[in-house]
Amino acid sequence: MSKKFKKLCTLVLAVSLILTSLAGCTKDKAEETSGNDAKKKIAFIPQLIGIPYFTAMEEGGQKAAADLGVEFIYSGATTASAPEQSKIMDSLIRQKVDAISISVLDSSSINPIIEKAKEAGIKVYTSDSDSPTSEREIYVAQAMDKDLGYTLIDRLALQLGNQGKIGVVSGESTATNLNLWIDYMKERISSEYPNMEILDVRYTQGGSSESALKQAQELMTKHSDINAIIAVASSTIPGVAQAVQQAGKAGQVAVIGYGSPQTVKPFIESGVMEESILWNAFDLGYLTVWAGQQLVEGKEFLPENEVPGLDYKVKYLKDEKTLLLGPPLVINKDNVDDYDF
């Protein structure tokens, strides 16, 4: 082998080694860049899917994801089920998402899964319904529970002339938010309305409209002098309203509750209901995803926060670790057509 050929081989080998090294660096850099540029995954587990309220939250979350450059995962069961929520959260943990938010149905069953998610390095927080005894990072609240309970009773008192006998039809008996609202209703009546009385509180299976219909019928049968029925979940309003309508007691037995505009619209138009208490569910979904992004990026919440996509500032209550969407919204014939959820 000639010296010239040996030099050529050495040169070729050297160039080959350099190119291989550069390719490896380029690959590593590309993988690093790809990892950094990958969209953060923010999940939300509703209490159930397929009703206008949570669909509006989903749409708000999708809009926020598009605006903020994150991926939004919306995953829930067709009925309100605490065991199903736990299964879904466990699946999301295995998927290694970056943040999980949940509308809590049962604190006792979900708290261990929240702890598991936190141990896996996932930012976990609550939205729509809280579990204050858990290790959640924050709570994204639609309104203060006290304000929701008080506002509903104040509005109902106006309809009843500050006196009357009331029945309550709620969702699942373990739902943290629903039970808190009922507690505050009782507190408001006790302190402000001595001539108003809650006769009975009934619960439904999975928050279904069919179960609510049956419970409302039983309330009216057992208490022939009942003056109002409160539906403490958007999914129970149709059942309660239909029970009153079918009994021919529209205008005699007032119906009020926490229902989305599209859910209550036909009953407001027919005269079965005058008002519903709620909030902007689309905005709540938007705020939920924004909050998840802030947590994943390690950003602190301010006493008042500018949230892209919302035309108002969102308060953060540091002691309660709560982001507050705003005050309750009273829905009636004057504004029911202003919302599409």
Image (cartoon, rainbow, N blue to C red):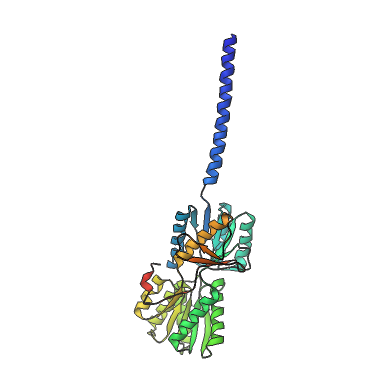
Which residue corresponds to the image point at 49% horizontal and 55% vertical from the top-left? 72
Tag count: 0
Which residue extends farthest left?
Answer: 269
Please determine whether, in this image, residue 266 is positioned above or below residue 102: below
Q: Is residue 307 visible?
A: yes
Q: Is residue 220 visible?
A: no
Please determine whether, in this image, residue 115 is positioned above or below residue 9: below
Which residue corresponds to the image point at 48% horizontal and 54% vertical from the top-left? 68
Which residue corresponds to the image point at 54% horizontal and 58% vertical from the top-left? 292
Q: Position of residue 250 (x, y in %)?
A: 38, 84
Which residue extends farthest top?
Answer: 2
Q: State left or right for residue 268 relative to residue 322.
A: left
Q: Nearer the viewer, residue 86 or 295?
A: 295
Q: Position of residue 144 (x, y in %)?
A: 54, 73
Q: Position of residue 83 (x, y in %)?
A: 57, 64
Q: Nearer the viewer, residue 144 or 208?
A: 144
Q: Residue 116 lies in what quarter of the image?
A: bottom right
Q: State left or right for residue 221 relative to residue 114.
A: left
Q: Could you tell me which quadrant the C terminus lies in?
A: bottom left
Q: Nearer the viewer, residue 215 or 192?
A: 192
Q: Position of residue 22 (x, y in %)?
A: 56, 30
Q: Could you tell me which quadrant the N terminus lies in?
A: top right
